[in-house]
Image (tube, rainbow, N blue to C red):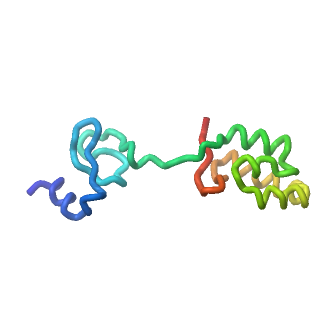
Amino acid sequence: MTSNETNDLDTPANNIIHCTTCGTKMATSASACPKCGAPNVAATQKTSQKTMVAAALLCFFLGTIGIHRFYVGKIGTGILMILTLGGLGIWTLIDLVRIITGSFKDKQGLPLKRD
């Protein structure tokens, strides 16, 4: 029995896919094929449809009224930002840094698209 067959037995059948390049069996969560090194398209991290550039621009120019929060679907915190004027600018600054560094997420918890 080869090492690939041993790995297949350890992993449930519904978590096995075939490499699109060479056809080797691999786990769905594998980042690349163990045989040919091709990236695993099934394991790529999902991202939001909202972009970082748009969110950063909205935050920079209209951040004190929370427009960037409405843009990513966070309506409740957007309203709070309107009422507090973006936490007197502090909340806006924190959001801007988080958007630029990539740690800001949309309503579903997905990272913003880097376009």
Q: Which residue is drawn at 30% across and 41% down?
A: 37
Image coordinates for residue 95, horizontal then vertical, percent: 75, 53
Image coordinates for residue 102, horizontal then vertical, percent: 63, 48
Left or right: residue 47 versus residue 7 is: right
> Is residue 36 positioned above or below 14 on the image?
above
Q: Which residue lies furthest to the left in this view?
A: 1
Residue 21 occupies which quadrant of the picture? top left
Q: Which residue is drawn at 8% across and 57% down?
A: 1
Q: Foreground: 66 or 114?
A: 66
Q: Residue at x 64, y 53 (%)?
A: 105
Residue 22 occupies which quadrant of the picture? top left
Q: Residue at x 65, y 43 (%)?
A: 50
Left or right: residue 46 versus residue 108 is: left
> Is residue 60 positioned above or below 103 on the image?
above
Q: Which quadrant holds the C terminus? A: top right
Left or right: residue 38 versus residue 106 is: left
Left or right: residue 50 versus residue 85 is: left
Residue 81 occupies which quadrant of the picture? bottom right
Image coordinates for residue 47, horizontal then vertical, percent: 55, 47
Image coordinates for residue 110, horizontal then vertical, percent: 58, 53
Count of numbered tags: 0
Q: Foreground: 67 or 89?
A: 67
